Image (spheres, rainbow, N blue to C red):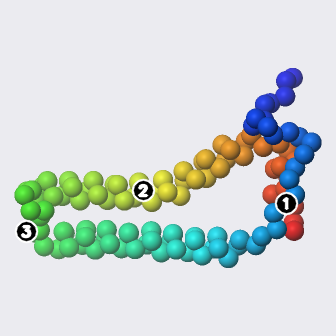
Amino acid sequence: MTRRELLPGVGEETLPPPVIADTRRAVARARRQAAARDIANILLLAALDYFFMRWPSTHVPGMSRDQSAMALIALNALVVTYIVLARLKPRMRARRIAATWSLRERSRFFQRP
């Protein structure tokens, strides 16, 4: 069985020293900010939906009510798609990159400091 090719210039025998940094607070803060942004986007979208449903004469200038409803549905779909992709895409990219790491490099993530 042939061995899988690692990234160019990456070998099994040498690993750089581990980086000593505690980024938990920064990561937790970034996650809280992202969650707050997502909640704000969803609340804004819900308010827009509420106003559109509450007043029957509401429409986008230059569009009929039906066209305005379709634009609102498209906006809802875009915002929800953005929120989902903003969370899933980095995970998928990280998994694809990590698949090229050697076993020693992978084991560093499971060691306790």
- Is label 3 or label 1 in front? 1
Amino acid type, mark 2: Tyr
Residue 21 visible, this angle: yes
Write the residue at 25% across / 70% down.
Answer: 48
Task: From this view, report whether residue 16 is shown above or below residue 97.
Answer: below
Residue highlighted by disc 3: 57
Please provide percent x and percent y for residue 47.
Answer: 28, 74
The crowding category of the residue bearing disc 1, from other C-alpha atoms within 10 Å (few below 14, some 14 to 19, many at least 20), is few
- Is label 1 or label 2 in front? 1
Amino acid type, mark 3: Ser
Q: Nearer the viewer, residue 6 or 79?
A: 6
Whether residues under marks 3 and 1 lie with C-beta atoms below 8 angstroms apart, the answer is: no
Write the residue at 13% across / 62% down.
Answer: 60
Task: From this view, report whether residue 22 is shown above or below residue 65.
Answer: below
How far is disc 3 from disc 1 in space, using C-alphas? 63 Å
The crowding category of the residue bearing disc 2, from other C-alpha atoms within 10 Å (few below 14, some 14 to 19, many at least 20), is few
Q: How many marks?
A: 3
Q: Judging from the image, what secondary structure is the residue with disc 3 in?
A: loop
Please provide percent x and percent y for residue 3.
Answer: 84, 28
How far is disc 1 from disc 2 in space, using C-alphas? 35 Å
Residue 110 visible, this angle: no
Write the residue at 7% across / 68% down.
Answer: 57
Q: Quadrant of the N terminus?
A: top right
Mark sitting earlier along the chain (3/1):
1
Mark sitting earlier along the chain (2/3):
3
Amino acid type, mark 1: Pro
Q: Judging from the image, what secondary structure is the residue with disc 2 in?
A: helix
Badge number at residue 18 = 1
How far is disc 2 from disc 3 in space, using C-alphas? 29 Å
Residue highlighted by disc 2: 82
Please provide percent x and percent y for residue 82.
Answer: 42, 56
Q: Nearer the viewer, residue 48 or 111?
A: 111
